């Protein structure tokens, strides 16, 4: 039996609370203030809330939801665009937009739950297979939207979300309607595979922009996956337990009768081919992706997704619990630069530092936040905290770290994943980049020697790892082969930017070649 959590519809409603006539509903939807995404989403969520608690025949409800569906998608897309620069913990406005996005998708899903339950419970006649397929497919797609909205806002998916998605798929498969599609409704199995792939793409390690790009990649290439029994040969894929409230994961579980196999072998081979074409300057449109996507970001994501959806990777270093330990944290290139300069220089002398004739004034002080270390390893650490103020932390942000127990040197790392357990509890995964870091000023030489100097970070090389010196630059500075002037007390040198080792939304980590070096 399909178990769906839905609100009651037998509670008396005030007349005129929500429009149920299709023509009038369509007219109202066209008049919504789409120029104001928040107002539009609020009106849609309120209307769906009232509609979901009103008794309606399944056909009538499905007809109304068919009118709502494209409008909900449009409004949700506008809210997602407002969240692209959102960090953790979010600012108040971003938090409200995130809550609204999740509520809108949740009410949309409840509408299809009501329709499907009515169809199943209708004992007077056999439910038409076409209506069943439509309701089940749209429901699973709406639940997938709830899942994506949670990942986009870094909150934990609601309890029973995966139980309902697995249950709807099992129900459709038992009725043999999982592959049935129409002109307006994709097959249910397609939406289910999209949800599985997104969960296996490790969304906590992505920025909001990366999550939206990953969804487009999944939509474009999901047809290259398959669901079925475990193959006899060794193929890339994942065991999918379809019982309980359990999302798919990379750790192989015990196979049993209720386990499916998501075959990703064809998808991974295709992604490797797409990556080669993008590296050769092919456009996203030429490889089957939407034309508006960022080609460089697509290349980075596709290479990562090919690894995640391929044979399982093992953790390189074992993690160890670190009870009672804590660290100070400062995020961002500019904030870390100010922090290190204030630690190294006397304030009076710091005000006189210059590159050429460009004065570098004394910067405001930097306040760090304190985090509890959950576990630690040679490659990184996991942190947990409840920041008092919105820090707007994002995946890919550089951070400076120092144990609170000792007044030692600062190390530098990068945020690799983020989760929010509730409105205040934040968890971070940090990858170590260097145990030492030094502040420098960098001025690109693009033919104008009067360009402004920019704060950057110098990461000394580690001979034991055969690692050379590197520069951690703000995103807008790097261009391969570009010359730059660097003030690195007590040295001043000219260099050329070489290979970019890492590119994130917040920084570029680059190698360089010094061709003029002098003491000042």
Image (tube, helix red, strand yellow):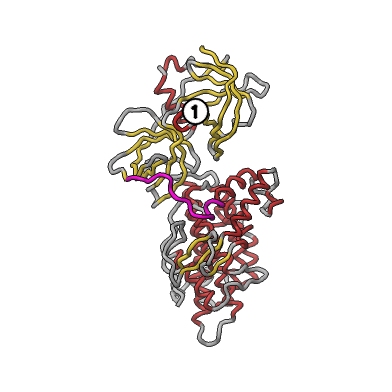
Which element is circle 1 on?
A: strand
Magenta stretch: dominant SS?
loop
Depth check: give the residue in front, 217 or 350. Answer: 217
Residue 314 pos. (x, y %): 45, 50
The residue located at (65%, 61%) in the rendering is: 30
Residue 511 pos. (x, y %): 56, 30
Residue 422 pos. (x, y %): 39, 52
Q: Is residue 244 part of the magenta span, yes or no?
A: no
**Left or right of 276 on screen, residue 262:** left
Residue numbers of the magenta segment:
305-320
Q: Residues within 10 Å of mark 1 (few under 14, many from 20)?
A: many
The residue labelled by disc 1 is 457
Q: Is residue 314 part of the magenta span, yes or no?
A: yes
Q: Is 60 drawn above or below residue 422 in the view shown?
A: below
Query: Which residue reaches farthest top?
Result: 520
Res. 100 visible in picture: no
Residue 57 pos. (x, y %): 55, 78
**Left or right of 355 on screen, residue 438:** left
The residue located at (51%, 52%) in the rendering is: 152
């Amino acid at each position: 039996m399909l178990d769906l959590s839905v609100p009651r519809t037998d509670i008396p409603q005030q007349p005129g609370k929500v429009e149920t006539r299709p023509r009038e509903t369509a007219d109202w939807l066209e008049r919504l203030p789409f120029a104001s995404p928040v107002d539009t989403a609020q009106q849609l969520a309120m209307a769906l809330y009232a509609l979901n608690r009103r008794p309606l025949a399944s056909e009538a409800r499905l007809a109304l939801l068919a009118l709502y569906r494209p409008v909900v998608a449009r409004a949700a897309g506008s809210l997602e665009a407002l969240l692209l620069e959102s960090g953790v913990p979010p600012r108040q406005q971003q938090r409200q937009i995130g809550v609204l996005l999740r509520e809108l998708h949740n009410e949309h899903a409840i509408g299809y739950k009501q329709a499907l339950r009515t169809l199943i419970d209708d004992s007077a006649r056999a439910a038409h297979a076409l209506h069943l397929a439509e309701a089940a497919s749209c429901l699973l797609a709406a639940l997938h939207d709830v899942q994506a909205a949670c990942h986009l806002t870094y909150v934990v998916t609601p309890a029973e979300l995966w139980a309902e998605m697995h249950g709807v798929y099992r129900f459709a498969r038992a009725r043999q309607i999982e592959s049935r599609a129409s002109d307006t409704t994709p097959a249910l199995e397609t939406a289910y595979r999209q949800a599985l792939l997104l969960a296996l793409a490790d969304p906590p390690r992505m920025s909001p922009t990366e999550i939206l790009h990953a969804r487009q990649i999944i939509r474009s290439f999901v047809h290259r996956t398959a669901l079925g029994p475990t193959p006899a040969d060794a193929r890339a894929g994942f065991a999918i337990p379809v019982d309980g409230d359990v999302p798919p994961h990379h750790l192989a579980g015990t196979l049993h009768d209720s386990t499916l196999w998501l075959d990703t072998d064809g998808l991974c081979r295709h992604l490797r081919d797409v990556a080669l074409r993008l590296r050769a300057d092919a456009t996203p449109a030429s490889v089957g992706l939407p034309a508006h996507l960022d080609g460089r970001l697509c290349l980075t994501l596709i290479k990562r997704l090919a690894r995640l959806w391929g044979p399982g990777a093992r953790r390189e270093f074992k993690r160890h619990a670190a009870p009672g330990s804590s660290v100070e944290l400062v995020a961002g290139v500019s904030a870390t630069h100010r922090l290190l300069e204030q630690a190294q220089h006397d304030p009076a002398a710091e005000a006189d530092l210059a590159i050429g004739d460009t004065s570098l004034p004394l910067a405001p002080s930097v306040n760090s936040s304190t985090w509890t270390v959950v576990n630690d390893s040679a490659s990184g650490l996991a942190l947990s905290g409840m920041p008092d103020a919105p820090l707007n932390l994002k995946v890919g942000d550089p951070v400076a770290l120092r144990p609170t127990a000792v007044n030692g040197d600062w190390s530098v790392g990068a945020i690799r994943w983020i989760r929010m357990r509730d409105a205040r509890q934040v968890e971070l995964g940090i990858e170590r980049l260097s145990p030492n870091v030094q502040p420098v000023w960098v001025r690109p030489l693009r033919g104008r020697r009067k360009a402004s100097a920019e704060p950057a970070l110098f990461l000394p090389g580690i001979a034991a790892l055969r690692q050379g010196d590197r520069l951690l630059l703000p995103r807008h500075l790097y261009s391969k082969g570009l010359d730059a002037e660097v003030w690195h007390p007590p040295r001043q040198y000219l260099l050329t930017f070489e290979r970019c080792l890492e590119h994130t939304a917040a920084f570029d980590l680059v190698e360089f070649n010094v061709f003029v070096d002098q003491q000042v």
